Image (cartoon, rainbow, N blue to C red):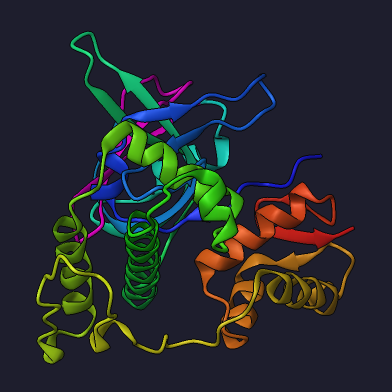
Amino acid sequence: MNARETAWRLFSSELNSATYEIKGDDEKSPSYVVTRLGAMVNRVLVAGVLTEKENVGTDDEPMWRGRVQDLASGNFFINVGRYQPEAAAAMADIDTPAFIAVVGKVRTYTADDERVFVSIRPECIVKITEDIRAQWLLEAARSTWDRLNRMKKATSLGDLSEKALLAKGFGEKDAKGIMTALDQYDIPNSTIYLKTIQTALRTILPEKNIDLGLPEDMSDDPDEIDIEPGSTSHSNADMEDIILSLLEELDTDGKGALRDELERRAESEGISSMELEEISNVLMDKGLVYEPNLRYLKRI
């Protein structure tokens, strides 16, 4: 079984401006949408306000379309069909406006006039608190900042090639994504992404009056970006171990762990509800846990 792709944290402005897709060699191989900052995106974890939703299908076979505002740069667009029953059920139950988190795969659509539109096909949708939405804004800002700096370092090399990037310590996917982005889009305008990061940080910390100065030279990291997250930082492996232990502890009657209680205990360990959803999906892909029903998660 192939490992599940990492769910990227990125703002809608970066995702929606992507127009190039790397298709998988066969139906089981992952496809990637390549952003202008070099992210090779198969899956995303996004958060924001569900401002609109519409059932464009029928009552028997609903097909939901939704708009999620990230509050920093624009909107994500989600499409939920019959092959995502849990996400469809969640969409039916959520009234707008509401803070939600979405984990899903990215899809592109090319219109007759050759314009490319990007949307998300959700694997799961959960309601979240404003605090968790703020945490996502911080994570997306950090992730965007990292990609900006990697792109800056890459374009500063005299010998710009995938091989040269690997020799400089870039990861394989980072090197391939950056070279693909430069080939397809040329050097990105850093000001666009700096403005988005600045807006996100001002939303989280309105009293700080954060000003990144919007420099084109990204050689020095501004002090304002160095913000400690509000919760404990765990690696994915650590979170998997914690969740597996909690599942064993909370399964007192053999039915599995009640999701509400699992979420409460996970948050006390510094694992947000968004992270819990992602780690649960990874563990299910690994064949370590399963869902007896929608309210429980059980360790195998």
Q: Residue at x 73, y 47 (%)?
A: 3
Classify the position of the N terminus by image quarter. top right
- Position of residue 139 relative to residue 61, above or below, is below
Region in magenta: 55-81
Q: Residue furthest front?
A: 158
- Position of residue 284 relative to residue 182, above or below, is below
Side of 9 relative to 29 (left or right): left
Residue 21, image x, y percentages: 43, 28
Q: Residue at x 67, y 19 (%)?
A: 26
Q: Quadrant of residue 278?
A: bottom right
Classify the position of the C terminus by image quarter. bottom right
Residue 135, image x, y percentages: 38, 75
Q: Is residue 58 magenta?
A: yes
Task: Choose between 6 and 240: the one closer to the eye.
Answer: 6
Residue 214, image x, y percentages: 11, 70
Q: Is residue 78 visible?
A: no
Q: Quadrant of residue 229?
A: bottom left
Task: Choose between 87 and 120: the one closer to the eye.
Answer: 120
Side of 112 relative to 284 (left or right): left
Q: Residue furthest top?
A: 112
Q: Residue at x 60, y 25 (%)?
A: 24
Residue 228, image x, y percentages: 40, 89
Task: Count how many numbered circles sit on residues in the image.
Answer: 0
Q: Is residue 65 magenta?
A: yes
Q: Is residue 18 visible?
A: yes
Side of 174 relative to 68 (left or right): right
Q: Residue at x 52, y 45 (%)?
A: 162
Q: Quadrant of residue 19?
A: top left
